[in-house]
Image: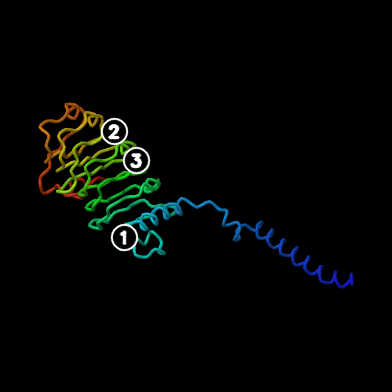
Amino acid sequence: MVSAALALIIPLLLIEASGGAVAQGAGRGGENVLTRSKLKPTPADLDRSILLEWRKGSPQLQHVWDDEDAPVSAWHGVTVGAEGRVVKIEQLKYADLTGVPAALGGLTALETLDLSWNQLTSVPKELGNLAALEVLDLSSNNLDSVPAALGGLTALKMLILFGAFANQLETVPAELGKLTALTALGLYKNDLTSVPAEIGRLSALTRLDLSDNKMTSVPKELGEAVQVNPIEPTLKAPGSKHFETKM
C-alpha cells in the first residue's frame, strides 16, 4: 500500500518541481507572462492610453481615428517622434470636437496642438502641463475664455486664439505674460476691450494681432517690449504666412 501511494505521489512532486524550475528559469531569462504583467507602461504606452481615452469619449474622434487597434502613428493628424512619443496633434479642423479631456495634459512630449475650427467651449487647465508645447492653435472655436494655467507653457512659441466669427474672448489672463518664449500671439476678431499689461513682458514677441476687437488703446508696456506688426485682412486666417514660424 505504501509503495503504491509513493508511486502516485513521486511523479506529482517531480511535475511540481519541474514546473517551478521552468517558472524560475523563465524569470531569469527575462520576460514571461508574469514578468510582463509587472512591467511599468512606457511613456509611449501612456500617450496611447490618453488618446484612446479621448477617442472613447468623443464620437467625433471615433470617425476620424476609426481604427482603435491601429498604432497612433496611423491616426489622422497624429505624429510620433522618438521612442513613439506623440509630438503633434493637428489636421482636426471641422471635426466638430466639443471637448478635450484633462488627461491630454499628460502628453509631456507634445510640441504642436492644433484644435482650431471646432466646437470647443472650454479647454482644461491641465493643458498648462504640456511642458514641451511650442504651438497651440485654438482658433475659431466657441471659447469666451482660456485658463490662466496656459501661462505655464514655458516652451510655447506660438499661441493663436483668433475669433474668426466663433471665439469671443472678452479677456485673456495676465498669466500669459509668463510665456517668455512666445514669438507670435494671435487675438484677432474677439471681443477684447483690453489686454493685460503683463503682455508687455513678452520680450521675444515679434508678431501680435489685436485687430478687430473692441479696444480703443493698448497698454503702453506693449510699445516698450514688443513689435506690433500691421496685418493685412487677407492674412488673418490661421496658417497664414503672417504666422509662419520656423521652429
- The amino acid at mark 3 is Gly
- The amino acid at mark 2 is Glu
Location of mark 2 (residue): 175
Q: In this view, does 185 lie to the left or right of 50?
A: left
Mark 1 or 2: the one toward you: 1
Q: Nearer the viewer, residue 180 or 33?
A: 33
Element type at mark 1: helix
x and y, in percent, of residue 220 in the image: 16, 26
Element type at mark 3: helix
Mark 1 or 3: the one toward you: 1
What residue appears at the point 65 percent right and 60 percent down from the top-left corner? 26
What residue appears at the point 35 percent right and 49 percent down from the top-left corner? 101
Crowd rating for badge 3 (residues with CA inside 10 Å; few <14, some 14–19, many 20+): some
Q: Which of 85 and 197 is in front in this view?
A: 197
Location of mark 1 (residue): 59
Element type at mark 2: helix
Kindly indicate the quadrant of the structure image that contains residue 176. Answer: top left
Crowd rating for badge 2 (residues with CA inside 10 Å; few <14, some 14–19, many 20+): some
Q: In this view, does 8 lie to the left or right of 143?
A: right
Q: Which of marks 1 and 3 is nearer the N terminus?
A: 1
Q: In this view, does 17 lie to the left or right of 167?
A: right
x and y, in percent, of residue 59 in the image: 31, 60
Q: Where 225 sits versus 90, above or below? A: above
x and y, in percent, of residue 75 in the image: 35, 61
Crowd rating for badge 1 (residues with CA inside 10 Å; few <14, some 14–19, many 20+): some
